[in-house]
């Protein structure tokens, strides 16, 4: 838009100078040709075409002095290219028709030429500043996105660390309760049983039975609490990573996308299924790599175990084999199990969240 306004300003100025030397009737053709060529220069915006059009108009200026007045307008587009020195040959028509024009007109045309150069220089600087601004804006946007991603990753990693620390603490508490309080209660129950066996007083035996029942109830409550703490302390991602770390038969990859807390029963089942599947790979496959994918969807979980082995297994005869164990684990979760041997061996398991 800036180029068009500048060219309109140049055209108006050169037209006014033209009308001082010639009548509108005499200058109309030069005006029309100048507008047409200037429009073509703006449309094509090509260095080679610009040179051809400029030389064509320069030839007209050599023939007829009326075309001379619009040379600044035609030169404007060449000043943006690497061929801007070509515009110096525009001095030839001015020298040729110097005697046909008044000194004032020559002076005004020279001033217009200088203004054309300054206008083009300003436009090019504005264009460069705009380009630099857009580049800087894009770089800042990219940097902002990168920093936001790193921040989110940091928060996620921090959440993982905190969650692991919490699970480890739960596991420690469960062990402490089991090793200390549980053993003390067990010892107390045994001692009370021994006292009851040798005691002769019926009232004492009845009192000891009440105490023993209370201790048994407390022991059962502690067992339940320890069991729950231990189940909650299992991090399935960490467990799977441990399994894969110890699996050296071939290369492994893990795709893990679980965001919510999975039930303990599902955790144990998935861990057992993965162990069984990897054991089957060692026994029955010639795979070069194994891929394990665990995904969470709004209503269900999906476990996909794939190996690229080329050996084919007889799935109709699974009694006594690892696949039968996998089937039983999936049935305990009320899930669905599918096998695919078209390209390698794939186990596809899905089960509802509830």
Image (tube, rainbow, N blue to C red):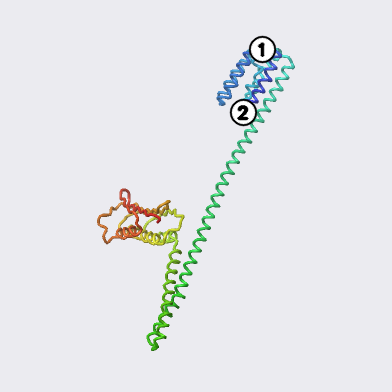
Q: Seen in the image, is 180 located left or right of residue 98?
A: left
Q: Is residue 340 above or below residue 131?
A: below
Choose the circle earlier in sequence order: 2 or 1.
Answer: 2
Q: Residue 228: x, y in percent?
A: 43, 66
- Tell me the residue at 55%/23% (across/down): 49
Q: Residue 223: x, y in percent?
A: 42, 71
Q: Seen in the image, is 247 located left or right of residue 85?
A: left
Q: Secondary structure at mark 1?
A: helix
Q: CA distance from mark 2 to mark 1?
A: 28 Å
Quadrant that contains the C terminus: bottom left
Q: Which mark is residue 125?
A: none
Q: Residues within 10 Å of mark 2 (few under 14, many from 20)?
A: few
Q: Which mark is residue 1?
A: 2
Q: Secondary structure at mark 2?
A: loop
Which of 352/338 is in front? 352
Q: Residue furthest front?
A: 203
Quadrant that contains the N terminus: top right
Q: Quadrant of residue 254?
A: bottom left
Q: Residues within 10 Å of mark 1 (few under 14, many from 20)?
A: few
Q: Residue furthest right?
A: 104
Q: Residue 268: x, y in percent?
A: 39, 62
Q: Quadrant of residue 34?
A: top right
- Tell me the residue at 55%/48% (across/down): 146
Q: Are marks 2 and 1 in contact (CB under 8 Å)?
A: no
Q: Is residue 84 above or below residue 245?
A: above
Q: Residue 149: x, y in percent?
A: 54, 50
Q: Which residue is under mark 1?
A: 24
- Tell me the residue at 26%/60% (across/down): 319
Which of 114/317 is in front? 317
């Amino acid at each position: 838009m800036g180029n068009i306004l500048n060219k309109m300003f140049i055209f108006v100025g050169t037209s006014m100078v033209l009308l001082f030397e010639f009548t509108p009737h005499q200058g109309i053709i030069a005006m029309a040709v100048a507008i047409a060529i200037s429009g073509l220069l703006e449309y094509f915006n090509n260095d080679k075409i610009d040179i051809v059009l400029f030389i064509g108009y320069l030839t007209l200026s050599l023939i007829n002095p009326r075309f001379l007045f619009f040379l600044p307008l035609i030169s404007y587009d060449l000043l943006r290219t690497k061929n801007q020195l070509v515009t110096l040959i525009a001095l030839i028509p001015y020298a040729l028709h110097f005697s046909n024009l008044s000194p004032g007109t020559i002076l005004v045309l020279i001033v217009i030429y200088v203004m054309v150069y300054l206008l083009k220089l300003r436009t090019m600087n504005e264009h460069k500043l705009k380009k630099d601004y857009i580049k800087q804006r894009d770089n800042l946007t990219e940097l902002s996105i990168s920093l936001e991603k790193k921040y989110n990753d940091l928060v996620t990693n921090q959440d993982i660390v905190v969650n692991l620390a919490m699970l480890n603490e739960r596991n420690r508490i469960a062990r402490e309760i089991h090793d200390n309080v549980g053993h003390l209660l067990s010892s107390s129950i045994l001692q009370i049983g021994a006292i009851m066996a040798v005691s002769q007083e019926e009232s004492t035996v009845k009192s000891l039975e009440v105490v023993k029942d209370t201790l048994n109830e407390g022991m059962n409550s502690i067992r339940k609490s320890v069991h729950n703490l231990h189940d909650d302390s299992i991090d399935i991602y960490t467990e799977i990573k441990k399994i894969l770390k110890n699996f050296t038969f071939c290369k492994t990859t893990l795709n893990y996308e679980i965001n919510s807390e999975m039930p303990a029963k599902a955790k144990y089942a998935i861990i057992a299924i993965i162990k069984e599947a990897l054991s089957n790979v060692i026994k029955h496959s010639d795979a070069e790599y194994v891929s394990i994918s665990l995904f969470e969807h709004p209503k269900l979980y999906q476990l996909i175990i794939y190996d690229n082995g080329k050996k084919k297994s007889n799935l109709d005869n699974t009694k006594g084999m690892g696949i039968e164990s996998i089937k039983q684990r999936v049935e305990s979760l009320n899930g669905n199990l599918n096998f695919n041997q078209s390209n390698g061996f794939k186990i596809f398991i899905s089960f509802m969240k509830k």
